[in-house]
Amino acid sequence: MIIDLTDTTSSEIASALLRARRNAGSPAMGMVGTIVVVVDEASHHDAMKAANEAGREHPSRVLVAILRPGRGSSSGLDAEVRVGEGIPGEAVLLRLHGELAKVPESVITPLLLPDSPVIVWWPGGGPKVPADDPLGRLGRRRVTDAAATRRASVDFSARAEGYQPGDTDFAWARLTPWRALMAAALDQYPTKVTGAEVVSAKGNPSADLMAAWLQQRLGVAVEQKTSRGPGITAARLFTPTGPISLTRPDGAVATFSVPGQPDRPVALKRRTTSELLSEELRRLDPDDVYAHTLACMVERESMPADEKKVSAADRRSAQTAASAAASRTADPNSSGNGKAEPTTGTAKKAAVKKAVAKKSTTARKKTAAKKSTSKSAAGSKSAASRGAGTKKAAKKGTGKRVAGRT
């Protein structure tokens, strides 16, 4: 059943909802909450469809608010009430015009279900600080989507500074299966992680959050690389025995690789908007891990680019050195002299510095030896000269004494 209301009020909308439920033969309400969707005219159809699909798992009252704060336009409220027609709960499409669009909470508040949680969702990106938004203050859970923003990039610094318990983002929800698989890998194969790498399409906010999460949880340098996508295409953890990798080049099926084990295919498809919204409706408590990841992401954004490159180089060198050490342990006869060959990166530089220092020490020793030899030779020559002079003087004195006797 669809009821159109023009230039109406919140009271009339509530009465229309009650009347529609009775006409549909379901006067009792079995809804678990209210979903407030803040959207524009162009994308309200897709947003309402996603909310209704999520309502099959969580029957809710869906309030879709289209704000039209145009200058010079008169204030007014138009509504479209939908009950039944394949909708698991109730759906109300609200168009707020003029000055009324600047105070949407005055229209939304009377339509909220009593004694039930409120979820506020911005499909088009959302405000910088969701908790400061007039409608965001009504929600127990505030859901944004950084990937859908029209801006060049999302200011996660403002999100982190203004974070309040209940804030979340679809960019974070998209990482749930990735984080679960990477955590399960370390649970099954506990080992030391020396570094990590995340590969994704350029400008993917989920990849930024993934890198920050790995750095925050593992305490290692995480390098980000770009690919053609779609979304995140690979995540790797570098260990002394080899990388633990999760690769998804097609956005549907991933390959899970662990050192010493055969590769395994894993279902890892890109989820729809309704599936992401359903996940957010399952959990209404504060997400502390997301808050810590936001803080770490701000630290990564303030880190100089050259410092990130140095950290990545050190990570690769440490991994190569650890792999070489593991190989020597497994096969002690692998190297003729029992010494590791210099590797690329920091290890190679260290080996070159050591060789240069050794050559300098040898040269200094040779120079010192030459100087010592020269001094000895000069001393011997001087002594010989002094001896020759003494002999000459002695011979002359003897001649004089013989002449005197004569």
Image (tube, rainbow, N blue to C red):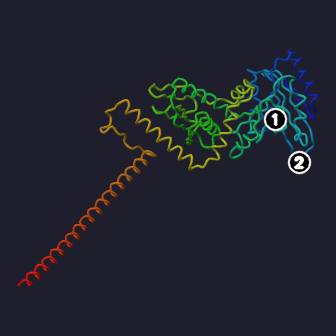
Res. 110 image quadrant:
top right
The CA distance from mark 2 to mark 1 is 24 Å
Res 149 → quadrant: top right
Residue 270, relative to residue 40: is it above or below?
above
- Compared with residue 105, is residue 73 higher up or lower down, i.e. above or below? below
Residue 85 horizontal side relative to residue 296, left or right: right
Q: Going 71% across and 36% down the picture, which residue do you hit?
A: 145
Pick the front one: 335 or 65:
335
Which residue is denoted by mark 1 in the rendering? 136
Q: Amino acid at mark 2?
A: Arg
Q: Position of residue 379 (x, y in %)?
A: 25, 67
Left or right position of 49 against 226: right
User: Of the residues tagged 2 and 1, which is closer to the observer?
Assistant: 1
Quarter of the image where the N terminus is located: top right
User: Could you classify mark 1 by the number of other residues whose Cα lies within 10 Å: few (under 14), some (14-19), or many (20 or more)?
Assistant: many
Q: How many marks?
A: 2
Image location (x, y in percent) of residue 158: 74, 43
The secondary structure type at the circle numbered 1 is: helix
Question: Is residue 271 rendered to the left or right of residue 159?
Answer: left
Disc 2 is placed on an element classified as loop
Q: Return the mark for residue 375.
A: none
Amino acid at the residue labelled 1: Gly
Tell me if 263 is positioned left or right of 140 in this view: left
User: Dividing the image into 4 quarters, which one contains the C terminus?
Assistant: bottom left
The residue depicted at 22 percent of the width and 67 percent of the height is: 380
Horizontal and vertical percent position of residue 61: 82, 25
The image quarter containing residue 16 is: top right
Which residue occupies 37% across, 33% down?
Answer: 328
The residue that mark 2 highlights is 71
Q: Is residue 118 above or below residue 224?
A: above
